[in-house]
Amino acid sequence: MKRSLVLVAAILLQCLAMVYAEATDAKTQRLAKMAKNNNGLVKLTSNTYTQFTEGKRNYGMVVLLTALGDYFNCGPCREFDPEYKLVASSFQSTEDPTRVFFGHLDFKDGQAIYQKLGLQTAPNVLYFPPAKPGQKVEPTKYDLARSGFSAESFANFVSRVSGLHVPVKRPFDYFSFGIKAFLVVGAAAILKLLYRHFSLVFHHKNTWAAFSILFILIMISGQMWNQIRNPPYVMPGPNGKMNFVAGGFQQQLGLESRIVAAIYGILAMATVALAVFVPKIKDKQHQRISTYVWVMCIFIVFSGLMNLFKLKNGAYPFRILF
C-alpha cells in the first residue's frame, strides 16, 4: 500500500513538473514570437511585464522603461530608444535569439509598474537573469549616466551580465558615405588647384607647428574617446541643473572634452607667447607687462584646470585660486 502511494505521488510530481516545464516553454515561445514579429523588440504592458519577469524562466530579459509621451518631453528617452532598438534587432539576427529578450515598457502602458518600482525618472534599463522555480533574483540596472547612450556601450553591458555575445550591426548609411566621398574628392581637387599658390604655407614650419598643437589638443581632451563611446553632450543634474563634467575617471561628457581642450589650448598659447613672442618685443616696459599678463593667464587658467580635476575626483586635495 505504501509503495503504491509513493509511486502515485512520484507520478503526480513528474506530471506537475512536465506541466510547469510546458508552461515555461510556452512563455518562451510567446516571447520569441513577439520578438520576431517586431524586429527583436517585445512590447510590454503592466501584466506582461510581471508575467515575463517573475517566476521560473530559462531566458534573460532586458526591459527598457521610458516615458515617450509628448507630455513628459523626455529627451533622454528619445535619444536612447533607437540605440536600444538597434541592439534588439542585432541580437534577433543571431543563431539563438531566445536566450535573451529585449522588452520595452512605456509609462502609458505600465503606470502600475512605475508605481511598484518607485520610479521618478526615465529612461531605466533592467536586466532579469534566468531563474529557477521559487528563486527571486534582483535585476541588474544599466547605468545610463555613467555608461552613455550608445548601442555599443549598452551591448557590452548585456554581454557582461548575460555571458552571451551581443553584437551591434548598424545599417550602412549610403547617403552619408556618398556625401563624405564627394567632400573628400572635392577637397582633393581644390587642394590640387591651389597647391601652387599656397605651397609656401604647406611647407612653413609654423603651419605644421599649429597642426601638431591642434592634433595634441584633440587627443588629450578625449575627442577620440567621444567618437568611440558616443557619450551624451551634457547630463541633467539635481534641481534642474545641467552637469557638464562626469564624475570619475572612466566617463566623460561631450562638453567636458571641449572645456579641457580650451583650457590646454590657452595654456599652450600662453607658453608659446612667453617663449617666442615676448622676447622679440623691443620696448622693455611692454615686454615686462606682456610677461606679467601671460604669466597671470597661465596661473589663472591652470587654477581652473585643477578645479576641473577636483570635480572629476572629489578627494583631490590641492587647489590654487578656486
Image (cartoon, helix red, strand yellow):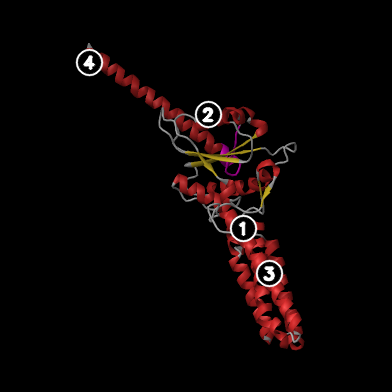
Vertical order, 272 against 176 (above or below)? below
Badge 3 crowding class, 10 Å Cα cut-off, few under 14, some 14 to 19, many 20 or more, is: few
39 magenta-colored: yes
Give the label, 2 or 1, closer to the camera: 1
Identify the mark nearer the N-term, 2 or 1: 2
- x and y, in percent, of residue 81 in the image: 64, 45
Tag 1's secondary structure? helix
The residue lying at 42 percent from left, 26 percent from top is 20
Q: Which amino acid type is shown beneath numbered disc 1?
A: Leu
Identify the mark nearer the N-term, 4 or 3: 4
Give the label, 1 or 4, closer to the camera: 1
User: What residue did someone put label 3 on?
Assistant: 296
Identify the mark nearer the N-term, 1 or 4: 4
The residue lying at 72 percent from left, 72 percent from top is 293
Left or right of residue 142, residue 322 in this image: right
Location of residue 11 by image quarter: top left
- Asked whether the viewer can see residue 169, the reply is no
